[in-house]
Image: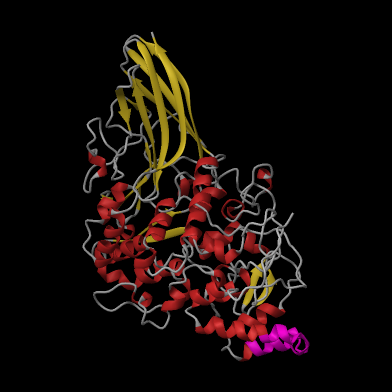
C-alpha cells in the first residue's frame, strides 16, 4: 500500500532551484504555478502551436541542450506527489538517482582531468585532438570545443567559460535522450560518434507520450524511440578505439581497442541482437538501468510530476521504468567524489552517492563473478589447491578503461593461525605486497609486470586479471595515445565468447600462452605449496580496483597541476579494494 503523501510544502522544487543556481529554474517554477492556476488558458494552446513557439526561438539545424536541473523540475522526487516511486514508496526519480552516478560527474572527475593532462604532457602536439576526443563523452554538451590556451587543459570547464555550466553537467539527461538511432552499432558511432536529433526530441520507450508539459517548460518533445533501450546506444561512448602516435606526435596508423565492453558483449551469450541467445540475452540497460526495484520487482510508476511538485492528473503509471542509478564497478571514484564534494564544487547530496555506492557494491558482489576452491590434493611433499573463477557479467571482467584490475588473494593459515603462505595480499595504500608486507616490484612505477599464471608457487606471483599497453616498438606504456596494442590482456572472457566471432580479434586474450583452462567465462589456477601434515585454513578472495595502484603510480610521475590535484584526493581516500567473491576451505593435510 502506498504511504499517504505529505502535506503541501513551500520547499517543493527547492533542490532543483538550488542545483540550477537559482534564477532560471525559479522563474520557470513561478510560471508553472501560474499555468496550474489557469488551466483553461494553457489548454487553449495546441501542441502544434507550442512546438512552433519552440522552433521559432532556436536557430535551425542546431542541437538544444538543457541542464539536468531543468529536467529535475518534473523528474525529481517530491514529497507531495506519488510519481517516480516504486511499489514500496521508495524514491526512484531519474534526476535523484542519476545525480550520484559517474555519468553526472564525468566532467568534474579529478582522475579524468589528471589523465587528460598526462596525455597532453606525453604528446603536446596532439592537445587539440586529445581534448576533443576526451570531451566527446565526458563533456558532450560543451561541443564543439576550442583548444585550451598554452599551458592549460580543459579550459572550457573553467567557471568563466561560456559553456562551463553545460560542460560540468556531464553526461546529462538531454545527452542520452537526444541521441538518434542513426548509425548505432556501427563503427561510425563508436568513440563518441553518436548523432543528436536536431528537433529537440527526447526519446523514451513509451508510445503516445503526453507532450505538452515538456514542450512548455523546457522546449523538448517526448518521442517514442525504441533505440533508447538498445546496447548499441551505450556503445557510442563505451566503445573507444584510439589512434596511436609516437613521441613527436606523428600518427603510427595503429589503433588500440582501448575499451570495448560493447564488442565483448556482442561476443557473448548476453548479446540480444541475435536470436540464438534468447534464453540468456541481456542488454546493457537491463543491468545498469534496471527496470526493477532493489528487491527485484518490476517498477510501474508515473514518469513525472508537475513543476509545483504535485501529480499530473492525466499521467498514469507506466512500465518499463528504468532505475537511473547507472551502477557499475567504480565504487572507489564515487566515494572520492562524495568525500570531496566541497573541493570539487559538487552540489549533489551525499545520500545520492551513497545510493549508487550501495547499488554498485551489490552488483559487484552478486552479478560479477563466482569463486570456488574446486580441488585440493597432496602428493609427496606438494599440496595442490585449484581455484576456479567464473565471470557472470556480460563482458570481460574487468572491462573498459585499462586502469581496472581484479586479482586473487589466497591466505593459508596453520592450526595456530600463523600464515604459512600468501599471494595477492594488499596494504593500506592499495598495493599488492609480498610476505614481508613490502609492495612487490610490479606495483611500482617503472617496474615489471606480472605475467598470466596457470600455476603459482610463491608469494610474489599473483594472478592479476588486467591489461597493459605497448607502443609500436613493443615497449610498455601507460599513455593511451602511445598504445598500439595490448601487451597483456588476461581479463576473464564473458560466457559464450568465441574465437570465430566477428569481434574475436578485437576482444581476444593476450599473453595467456598455453593455459588450457582459460576458457570462455572461466579460469582455473593451481597453487603448488609445500605444506607439512596438519590442519590448514585456506581463504581465497577475488579483489577489484577500478584504479590499480600501478596505474596510479605511473600517473603520479607526471608533473601537471591536474595530477597534483588528483594526488591530494587519492592519498586521503580509502584505498581498500572491493571484495567480489570469497571461498574458504578447512584441509587436513596427511
> x, y percentage for residue 86?
67, 56
Identity of the residue drawn at 42% across and 16% down: 587
Number of disc labels? 0
* Rendered location of residue 297, percent (x, y): 68, 49
Q: Where in the figure is residue 338, as x and y percent of width and height?
A: 41, 59
Q: Is residue 487 above or below residue 5?
A: above
Q: Nearer the viewer, residue 53 or 63?
A: 53
Q: Residue furthest front?
A: 7
The chief SS type of the magenta part is helix
Q: Is residue 251 left or right of residue 560?
A: right
Pick the quarter of the image with the N terminus: bottom right
Which one is in front, 463 or 271? 463
State which quadrant residue 460 falls in.
top left
Its colouring scheme is: secondary structure
- The answer to whether any part of residue 99 appears in the image is yes
In front of the other: 437 or 358? 358
Q: Quadrant of the C terminus?
A: top left
Q: Quadrant of residue 588?
A: top left
Q: Which residues are magenta?
A: 34-54
Kindly identify the residue that appears in the image at 62 percent across and 91 percent down: 56
In the image, is residue 103 above or below residue 402? Answer: below
**Relative vertical location of residue 392 with respect to residue 506 in this rendering, above or below:** above
143 and 264: which is toward the camera: 143
Left or right: residue 223 versus residue 150 is right
- The reply to whether residue 252 is visible in this rendering is no
For the point 38% across and 58% down, which residue is it? 339
Give x and y (percent) for residue 323.
61, 58
Is 360 magenta? The answer is no
Left or right: residue 358 compared with residue 90: left
Q: Residue at x 65, y 77 (%)?
A: 308
Amino acid at each position: 500500500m502506498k504511504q499517504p503523501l505529505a502535506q503541501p510544502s513551500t520547499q517543493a522544487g527547492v533542490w532543483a532551484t538550488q542545483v540550477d543556481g537559482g534564477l532560471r529554474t525559479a522563474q520557470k517554477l513561478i510560471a508553472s504555478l501560474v499555468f496550474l492556476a489557469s488551466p483553461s488558458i494553457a489548454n487553449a494552446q495546441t501542441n502544434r502551436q507550442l512546438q512552433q513557439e519552440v522552433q521559432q526561438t532556436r536557430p535551425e539545424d542546431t542541437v538544444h541542450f538543457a541542464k539536468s536541473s531543468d529536467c529535475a523540475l518534473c523528474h525529481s522526487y517530491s514529497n507531495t506527489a506519488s510519481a517516480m516511486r516504486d511499489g514500496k514508496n521508495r524514491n526512484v526519480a531519474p534526476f535523484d538517482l542519476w545525480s550520484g552516478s559517474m555519468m553526472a560527474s564525468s566532467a568534474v572527475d579529478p582522475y579524468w582531468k589528471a589523465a587528460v593532462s598526462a596525455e597532453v604532457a606525453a604528446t603536446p602536439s596532439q592537445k587539440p585532438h586529445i581534448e576533443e576526443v576526451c570531451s566527446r563523452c565526458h563533456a558532450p554538451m560543451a561541443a564543439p570545443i576550442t583548444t585550451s590556451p598554452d599551458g592549460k587543459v580543459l579550459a572550457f570547464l573553467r567557471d568563466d567559460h561560456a559553456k562551463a555550466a553545460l560542460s560540468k553537467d556531464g553526461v546529462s539527461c538531454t545527452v542520452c535522450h537526444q541521441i538518434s538511432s542513426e548509425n548505432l552499432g556501427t563503427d561510425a558511432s563508436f568513440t563518441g560518434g553518436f548523432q543528436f536529433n536536431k528537433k529537440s526530441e527526447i526519446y523514451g520507450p513509451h508510445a503516445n507520450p503526453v507532450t505538452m508539459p515538456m514542450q512548455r517548460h523546457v522546449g523538448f518533445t517526448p518521442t517514442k524511440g525504441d533505440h533508447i533501450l538498445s546496447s548499441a546506444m551505450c556503445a557510442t561512448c563505451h566503445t573507444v578505439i584510439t589512434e596511436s602516435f609516437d613521441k613527436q606526435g606523428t600518427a603510427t596508423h595503429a589503433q588500440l581497442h582501448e575499451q570495448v565492453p560493447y564488442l565483448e558483449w556482442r561476443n557473448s551469450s548476453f548479446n540480444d541482437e541475435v536470436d540464438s541467445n534468447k534464453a540468456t540475452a541481456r542488454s546493457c540497460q537491463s543491468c545498469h538501468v534496471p527496470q526493477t526495484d532493489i528487491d527485484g520487482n518490476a517498477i510501474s510508476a508515473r514518469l513525472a510530476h508537475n513543476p509545483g511538485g504535485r501529480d499530473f492528473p492525466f499521467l498514469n503509471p507506466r512500465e518499463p521504468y528504468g532505475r537511473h542509478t547507472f551502477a557499475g564497478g567504480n565504487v572507489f571514484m564515487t566515494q572520492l567524489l562524495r568525500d570531496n564534494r566541497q573541493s570539487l564544487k559538487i552540489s549533489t547530496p551525499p545520500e545520492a552517492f551513497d545510493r549508487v555506492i550501495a547499488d554498485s557494491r551489490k552488483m559487484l558482489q552478486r552479478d560479477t563473478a563466482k569463486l570456488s576452491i574446486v580441488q585440493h590434493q597432496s602428493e609427496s611433499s606438494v599440496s595442490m589447491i585449484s581455484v576456479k573463477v567464473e565471470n557472470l557479467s556480460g563482458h570481460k571482467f574487468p572491462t573498459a578503461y585499462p586502469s581496472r584490475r581484479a586479482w586473487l588473494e589466497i591466505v593459508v593459515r596453520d592450526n595456530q593461525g600463523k600464515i604459512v603462505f600468501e599471494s595477492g595480499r594488499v596494504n593500506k595504500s592499495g598495493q599488492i605486497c609480498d610476505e614481508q608486507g613490502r609492495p612487490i616490484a610490479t606495483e611500482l612505477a617503472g617496474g615489471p609486470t606480472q605475467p598470466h599464471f596457470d600455476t603459482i608457487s610463491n608469494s610474489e606471483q599473483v594472478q592479476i586479471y588486467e591489461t597493459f599497453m605497448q607502443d609500436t616498438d613493443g615497449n610498455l606504456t601507460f599513455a593511451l595515445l602511445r598504445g598500439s596494442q595490448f601487451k597483456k590482456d588476461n581479463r576473464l572472457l564473458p560466457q559464450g565468447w568465441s574465437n570465430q566471432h566477428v569481434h574475436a580479434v578485437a576482444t581476444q586474450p593476450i599473453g595467456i600462452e598455453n593455459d588450457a583452462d582459460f576458457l570462455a567465462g572461466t579460469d582455473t589456477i593451481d597453487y603448488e605449496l609445500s605444506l607439512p601434515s596438519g590442519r590448514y585454513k585456506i581463504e581465497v578472495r577475488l579483489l577489484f580496483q577500478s584504479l590499480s595502484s600501478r596505474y596510479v603510480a605511473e600517473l603520479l610521475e607526471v608533473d601537471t597541476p591536474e595530477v597534483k590535484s588528483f594526488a591530494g584526493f587519492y592519498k586521503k581516500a580509502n584505498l581498500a579494494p572491493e571484495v567480489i567473491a570469497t571461498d574458504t576451505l578447512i584441509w587436513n593435510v596427511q
